[in-house]
Image (cartoon, grey):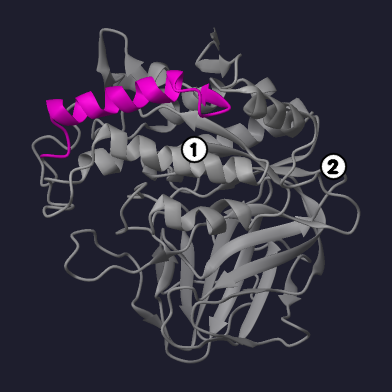
Amino acid sequence: MTEIEGGIRRMKTPRNVLAAATLALALVFPLGAQAAGDGEWIDTWAAAPQPVWGPDFLAGLTFPRNLWNQTMREVARVSLGGTKVRVVLSNEYGALPMTVGEAHIALSDSGAKIKEGTDRTLTFGGSASITIPPGAPVVSDPVDLEVPALGSVAVSLFFPEVTPTTTMHNDGRQTAYIVAGKKTGDADIKPDSTTLSRLFLTGIMVDAPEGARAIVTFGDSITDGDGSSADANHRWPDVLAERLQAAGGAPTAVLNEGISGERVLTDRMGTNALARFDQAVLSHPHVDTVIFMMGINDIGWPDSVLDPQGIPRSADDIIAGYKQLVARAHDHGLRMLGATLTPFNNAFGGGPLEGYYNDEKEAKRVAVNEWIRTGGAFDGVIDFDKVVQDPGNPNKIRADFNKGDDLHPNDAGYKAMAESIDLGMLAAH
């Protein structure tokens, strides 16, 4: 049995008595990640690390292939605020040790400027520099800095040695600034170049307010925000964070673990979801809920220039992947909410990505969505498909919500998606 409220389909009868007991306990007090207490830390912002692809893949890269005697300043809007802050840097996809010669954090003002009096030097085990082994992340020491909820910070990193840019987040949708020399503490920098991608910065943490918790949004480009305005924080997880902040209640971080091009079962622009689940979800302290939306690229990529030799995936293949992810979430006491796949009729039609959509692929999307709604595996369903579809042609995205490629929403579409979510479904109990 189900009950529909707006764009949400709630599950009233779990699959069996054990699932009902597990869900009831998770709603009262999530088993896998207890709410924060004094002296604890919580992630307030995240960017999923990706490997750099080779020239055999059509997508271009918008940043230098290495940094040398250069400073990079990256801006990020947090969800929760705090009085102390730390950053997480990653050399996950590096083949060589990576040296960060100096790192600073400050409150962002506008563009590459920082707010007067807020610049702080970051240290790592007491040292102002650190060399990060291949495959490893590092966490900075805490610094005192009043970071407001939904405030923006600027993280400045200096690279004294030739540093291949092998760990990145491609679709950052936020301008980062690159300048020659050590300029980490400068109040403003005049960049030599800019990029909308992120390099090496994968997390920001704050001292957790009492009772703080986190929600992870785990998905592909529609979670990553493709189609939203750069430097505007108009992705649907951004709008959801604003709604949760305005609503009050338990302090709730929203962590965007979307990767444009991500697939459930296959690597390319990012590691497949089954392989990435531990890092994307379980690595974050105090997570109790996951909103999962992925699968359209598993359907669309094969038989297109994106993956011409790719294995076509059936609806059952994708659903089998979903079942694995839900089982792993439940094993850690997490709520797993499934979001339906949005319409993609004529996606990339007439362009180099022609073939991403056809009627057979649409039938797979419909079948996957039907299972998400009625299969009973997820603890609840967010029906984004219903929110953005054209009422007169349900397999197409509404014109006023369409970025222009018939796949990705625009700012208005993402806002509608976020506003369709019943916050009661996400509340801590």
How far across and down, in percent of the image, does residue 166 sit? 39, 75
Image vertical order of residue 157 relative to residue 336, above or below: below
Q: Which mark is residue 292?
A: 1
Q: Secondary structure at mark 2?
A: loop
User: Which label lies toward us, 2 or 1?
Assistant: 1
Q: Residue at x 60, y 87 (%)?
A: 101
The magenta segment: 355-381
| Residue underneath mark 2 | 211
Is residue 370 inside the magenta stretch?
yes
Quadrant placement of the N terminus: top right
Q: Quadrant of residue 423?
A: top right
Q: Residue at x 44, y 57 (%)?
A: 275
How far across and down, in percent of the image, does residue 344 sit? 25, 29
Is there CB contact under 8 Å for labels 2 and 1?
no
Q: Return the residue found at the far right.
A: 38
Question: Which one is in front, 80 or 428?
Answer: 428
**Pointer 1: residues within 10 angstroms few (<14), some, or many (20+)?**
many
Q: Secondary structure at mark 1?
A: strand
Q: Which mark is residue 64?
A: none
Q: Is residue 8 left or right of residue 335?
A: left
Earlier residue among tags 2 and 1: 2
The three-letter code of the residue at mark 2 reads: Gly
How far across and down, in percent of the image, does residue 188 sit? 60, 69
**Pointer 2: residues within 10 angstroms few (<14), some, or many (20+)?**
some
Image vertical order of residue 263 relative to residue 347, above or below: below
Q: Is residue 319 left or right of residue 327?
A: left
